[in-house]
Image (tube, helix red, strand yellow):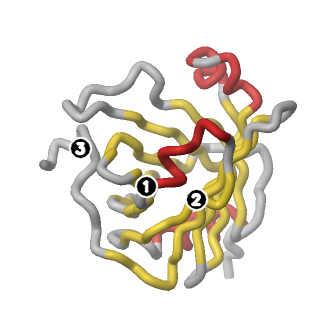
Amino acid sequence: MIELSQQQHFWNSLQSLCGQAFQGKFVYGNAGDSAFRTSTLVMHVRSCSSREIRIPVHVGADRSRTWILTQTETGLRLKHEHRHADGKEDAISQYGGDTRVSGSATLQEFYADSLTASLNPAFRTNVWTLEIVPGNRLAYALRREGTDRRVRFDFDLAEPVSPPPPPWGSGKR
């Protein structure tokens, strides 16, 4: 019998959500996070393949954000794709990073990569965390090491919602 790695368990938990959407709430953040505080947050585990999971995140009517998770040779990768309403990619897009350790079946940390640091030097110490408590919540968090920058959203996995419209730039209007 082959034992699954912690990251494979985590990946399988994300895959099990494919096609579903969930409402979220802003848990904490900094003063500049006002749009997240006052808007309805919805994540949609929109597409899944054996190597990639795409999760658009809607903030009110703003459909610009998509989390892209991929399996790499050494672990997992999280990227943030940002697009404008016309579908064009934003100048600050494709930032994120890779796991450095196996993490756990419920929690993975992604450390900023060199592309992220080149897009915005302040992002070079970013660490993003995804936590899945099956049937309960998916938490997304950011911490910027060496600063007080923190943000967290929790999405309620117990109550799926209707999937939102496609994200900007998806080619499917």
Residue type at the position of mark 1: Ser
Q: Give the crowd class for mark 3: few <14, some 14-19, many >=20 residues within 10 Å.
A: few
Q: Nearer the viewer, residue 29 or 88?
A: 29
In the image, is 73 to the left or to the right of 173? right
Asked if disc 3 and disc 1 are in contact, CB closer than 8 Å, the reply is: no
Residue type at the position of mark 3: Ser
Look at the numbered disc 2 and give the secondary structure of its residue: strand
Look at the numbered disc 1 and give the secondary structure of its residue: loop
Look at the numbered disc 3 and give the secondary structure of its residue: loop
Q: Earlier in the sequence, mark 3 or mark 1?
A: 1
Quarter in which the N terminus is drawn? bottom right
Coordinates of residue 11 in the picture (x, y in percent): 57, 64
Asked if disc 1 and disc 2 are in contact, CB closer than 8 Å, the reply is: no
Q: Looking at this view, name the residue that lies furthest to the right.
A: 146
Q: Quadrant of residue 135?
A: bottom right
Asked if disc 2 and disc 3 are in contact, CB closer than 8 Å, the reply is: no
Give how far apart the Cα atoms at labels 1 and 2 are. 9 Å
Q: Which residue is mark 3?
A: 170
Q: Earlier in the sequence, mark 1 or mark 2?
A: 2
Give how far apart the Cα atoms at labels 3 and 1 are. 22 Å
Q: Which mark is residue 39?
A: 1
In this rendering, the answer to whether 37 lies above or below 133 is above
Coordinates of residue 81 in the picture (x, y in percent): 42, 37
- Can residue 54 be seen here? The reply is no
In the image, is 97 to the left or to the right of 56? right
Q: Which residue is mark 2?
A: 26
- Can residue 48 be seen here? The reply is yes
Coordinates of residue 137 in the picture (x, y in percent): 59, 74
Residue type at the position of mark 2: Phe
